[in-house]
Amino acid sequence: MQNIKQNPKKINKKKIVISKYKRKLLKHVWLVRTGLIALILLSSYLLYFLISLALGRFGISSYLNLFSDFVFTPIQKIHTAENRTNILILGKGGEGHEAPDLTDTIIFASIDHVSPSLSLISLPRDIWIPELRAKLNSTYYWGNQKQENGGLILAKSTVENIVGLPVHYGLVIDFSGFMKTIDVLGGIEVDIENGFVDEKYPIEGKEDDLCDGDSEFKCRYETVRFEKGREIMNGETALVYARSRNAEGDEGTDLAREIRQQKILTAIQVKVLSSEILLSPKKIFSIWDVVRDSVETDMDLSVGAILARRFIQAKDKISSHVLSEDLLINPPVQYRYDNLYVFIPEAGDWEDIHAWISETLTSN
């Protein structure tokens, strides 16, 4: 039997050196990710920088300051109360929907700066606001009717009364931006705990269709179905899952809807903080393009940089809650509430809700 001696492959010294440094970098993967995100924050405004620099009225020091804000998170540059920053997150229909400025997703988010953590508390859209004689989900709309860009101002002040805490910043995203963001991420994985069928999911653009005289207006709706288990959802599917409200049984309640919305947010958070996204400048730039075009906020760049860093630090300490229905009652439909389906505080005022919010935040 003849021994065959295989010729060893030539060793590529350059590849060895690259491999050696790659292993060192992977030992500090979060440092790499942090640097990448900081770079993205700076690069996203490169065009503005170049234009301003050409006009001679903007210096590179501003961008160095932004990088510094992200890395060192100076607390004096951001609004806080008892070492927390509170943000109101609103989701609206946007253009092409029957009520584009109604915010059916309402989430009070609180970030702890001492021991970085994030608490999300969903508020029912049907909470009755006596001062406005309207539901909570219409405060953004009425604020915009009173003054230009007044939607966030009124929504924030209204939620402050409900939760008993200051709302420092606001953020509004429309449904199209929501779908585009998920699609840019490449989809999200959602754990569907309870399957359901909704036979009255509204078809966009058919809100006023007379359906050839059909008294039940069946042509305005379609049937959507979700099976129990894990599912990879694109933007359109995730939006249907988050918005469905006419399923039979428990999944047809507002509470179930709010829980599903938080599941979507959690799935987005998991995907955004994955190495697949954080180590892909191309995807981060794409996400930034969507966010820039579809998000309204009163945060400046410095605040955004600090909160982005806190969000990363809190990646393993994010909790989701829904305002307890034990604190609310659903009164009979009556003229006092414009014959609408509403929730009012069971105690007659917001004090019990203030206590519940405070306890929920401190227990996390």
Image (spheres, rainbow, N blue to C red):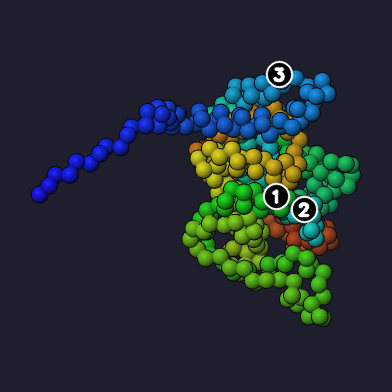
Residue 255 visible in the displayed image: no
Which amino acid is tagged 2? Gly
Residues marked 1 and 2 touching at CB (< 8 Å)? yes
State the residue in front, 177 or 350. 177
Compared with residue 339, is residue 166 higher up or lower down, i.e. above or below?
A: above
Query: Which label was assigned to residue 94?
Result: 2
Compared with residue 298, is residue 225 higher up or lower down, i.e. above or below?
A: below
Classify residue 223 as left or right of residue 22.
right
Which amino acid is tagged 3? Ser
* Residue at 75% in and 19% down: 59
Which amino acid is tagged 1? Gly
Instruction: State the residue lying farthest toward the left.
Output: 1
Residue 231 visible in the displayed image: yes
> How many residues crowd around disc 3 within 10 Å: few (fewer than 14), some, or many (20 or more)?
few
Location of mark 1 (residue): 177
Classify residue 333 as left or right of residue 85.
right
* Residue at 81% in and 72% down: 209
Image location of residue 146, percent across then percent down: 89, 44
Classify residue 52 as left or right of residue 7.
right
* Residue at 69% in and 45% down: 290
Mark 3 or mark 2, which has the lower sequence index?
3
Image location of residue 107, percent across then percent down: 67, 45
Q: Quadrant of residue 159?
A: top right
Camera-near label (1 vs 2) is 1
Q: Secondary structure at mark 2?
A: loop
Q: Secondary structure at mark 1?
A: helix
Location of mark 3 (residue): 61
Q: Quadrant of residue 246?
A: bottom right
Q: CA distance from mark 1 to mark 2?
A: 9 Å
* Residue at 82% in and 81% down: 213
